[in-house]
Amino acid sequence: YAPNISMDRETGIGTWTDAQITITIREGKRPDGSVIGPPMPIELYNHMSDRDTKAIVAYLRTVKPVKNKVRKSVFRMPLHAAKPAGKVADVSRADPVRYGAYLAGPVGHCIECHTPMVRGKFDYKNDVGRGGRPFRGPWGIAVSRNITPHPEDGLGKWTDAQIMKAITEGVRPDGTK
C-alpha cells in the first residue's frame, strides 16, 4: 500500500522533519524505525544528490494535507534500509553520459525495471538496462525492453528523437505503443 505522503499531520508526513523525510527517501527508514519495502527504489535513491533530494522535500512541503489513513504493507521477506547516504554531490550536466546515467538511475530509476534480477537482486554490474523483467497486472504480462545500445535487441539504431518520443509518448520508431 502506498503511504500518504501529503502534509497531513495525522495520516501523512506533516509532522516529519526535513531530515526525516530525506532519510526516508534515501535510506528507506521511517522516523519510527520501520523500513520501507518495494517498490520504493531505495538502492537508487541512496545516490540522489543532496540538491535534488532537498528539492523533493521542498516540493512535498507544498502538497496539500489530505487525511487518508492507509494500512501498512506486509512483506514476506526481510527488509533492509540502505546505508546512510552522507553527502552526495550534484552530477555535472557538462558530462552528458554521467548525467544521463544519473537521470536513468537515482532520479528516474529507469534502470530498475529494465535490469534483470539474479537471486532476488538487480544485476546492475553485468546486465544494467538489458530488460526482460516481467510485470504482471490486469493487462496480462508486460516485459521490460532492452534499453542498452545493442544494435539489434536494444536502442542502438534509434535516433535521439526516437528515444525521446518513446520516453515522452510511449511510441516506438515503428509506431507501436
Image (cartoon, rainbow, N blue to C red):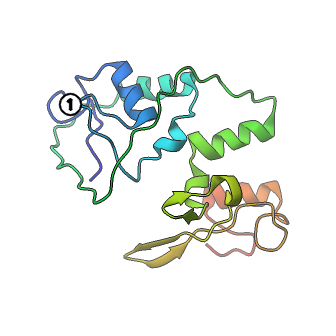
- Identified at 76% across, 37% down, the residue is 98
| Position of the C terminus by quadrant | bottom right
Q: Is residue 153 above or below residue 11?
A: below
Residue 162 image offset from top left, x and y in percent = 76, 61
Q: Is residue 151 left or right of residue 59?
A: right
- Identified at 61% across, 63% down, the residue is 170
Q: Is residue 158 left or right of residue 140?
A: right
Residue 57 image offset from top left, x and y in percent = 42, 26
- Identified at 64% across, 46% down, the residue is 104
Q: Is residue 12 above or below residue 70?
A: above
Q: Secondary structure at mark 1?
A: loop
The residue at which mark 1 appears reads as: 8
Q: Is residue 175 left or right of residue 141?
A: right
Residue 175 image offset from top left, x and y in percent = 70, 74
- In the figure, residue 61 lies in which quadrant? top left
Q: Nearer the viewer, residue 75 or 147?
A: 75
What is the three-letter code of the residue carrying label 1? Asp
Q: Nearer the viewer, residue 2 or 30?
A: 30
- In the figure, residue 166 lies in which quadrant? bottom right
Q: How many marks?
A: 1
Q: Is residue 122 left or right of residue 127?
A: left
Q: Is residue 128 above or below residue 57?
A: below
Residue 161 image offset from top left, x and y in percent = 78, 56
Residue furthest to the bottom in view is: 140
Mark 1, residues whose alpha carbon is within 10 Å: few (<14), some, or many (≥20)?
some
Q: Is residue 114 above or below residue 27?
A: below
- Identified at 74% across, 58% down, the residue is 163
- In the figure, residue 8 lies in which quadrant? top left
